[in-house]
Amino acid sequence: MSHENPVGPEAAATEVAVLGGGCFWCTEAVFAALEGVLRVESGYCGGACPAPSYEQVSSGTTGHAEVVRIEFDPARISFRQLLAVFFLTHDPTTLNRQGPDVGTQYRSVIFCQSPAQRCEAEAMLAELEAGRVFPGPIVTELAGSPPFWPAEDYHQSYFARNPQQPYCAALIPPKLEKLGQYFPEKLRRD
């Protein structure tokens, strides 16, 4: 059974981005709202043990981050645009923390899937730092492409299935509002 949640028709040529910006419920909801994003899957990346469980990752001892694997159509949305959304919708200046979530599993991280993605991520980080966009230094980690482990089924499309869950209802709508304010042309129309 596939853990991926389809969010649109597939294009012939696709790319993958793997990003960690705190709780994957929040990150998944943001990227699923974008035109050109074909699938978003919550999971774990960057740790030592294979096929970790949510409980293992939540302990903070495996080295994994909660991430989303984003399959996208680069003709409709670029990796750079995905990075712009990523930096807009989480705080890249807090080390191992996003809001109420604390631990290395909530770190800000870009798992670069190619040398081109690494160059693009490095360039964006340099631009953000030079422009002093954030009140403090950016601590986002740039990493290679270790194995991605899908999260359990109940984590997939979590906000879409549980919009009234208190954590989701408090944290995700402000991110989606910010997304609509800054990137209205990139929002899905369906």
Image: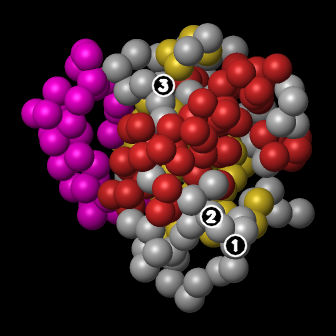
* Foreground label between 3 and 2: 2
- In the shown orientation, is residue 5 left or right of residue 143? right
* Foreground label between 1 and 3: 1
Secondary structure state at the residue bearing disc 2: loop
User: Looking at the image, which residue is at 48% across and 44% down?
Assistant: 181
Tell me the amino acid under the disc marked 1: Gly
Residue range in magenta is 113-142
Secondary structure state at the residue bearing disc 1: loop
Give whichever of discs 1 and 3 has the lower sequence position: 1
Q: Looking at the picture, how far across and down is residue 14, in whole percent?
A: 52, 76
**Residue 45 badge:** none
Q: Is residue 138 magenta?
A: yes
Give whichever of discs 1 and 2 has the lower sequence position: 1
User: Looking at the image, which residue is at 83% across and 36% down?
Assistant: 163
Task: From the image, tell me which residue sits under label 2.
Answer: 188
Does 18 appear above or below 8? above
Q: CA distance from mark 3 to mark 2?
A: 27 Å
- Image quadrant containing the N terminus: bottom right
Please name whichever residue, 87 or 155, is drawn nearer the observer in this view of the structure: 87
Tell me the amino acid under the disc marked 3: Arg
Task: From the image, tell me which residue sits under label 3.
Answer: 107
Cβ–Cβ below 8 Å for labels 1 and 2?
A: yes
**Residue 8 badge:** 1
- Give the crowd class for mark 3: few <14, some 14-19, many >=20 residues within 10 Å: many
Please name whichever residue, 54 or 96, is drawn nearer the observer in this view of the structure: 96
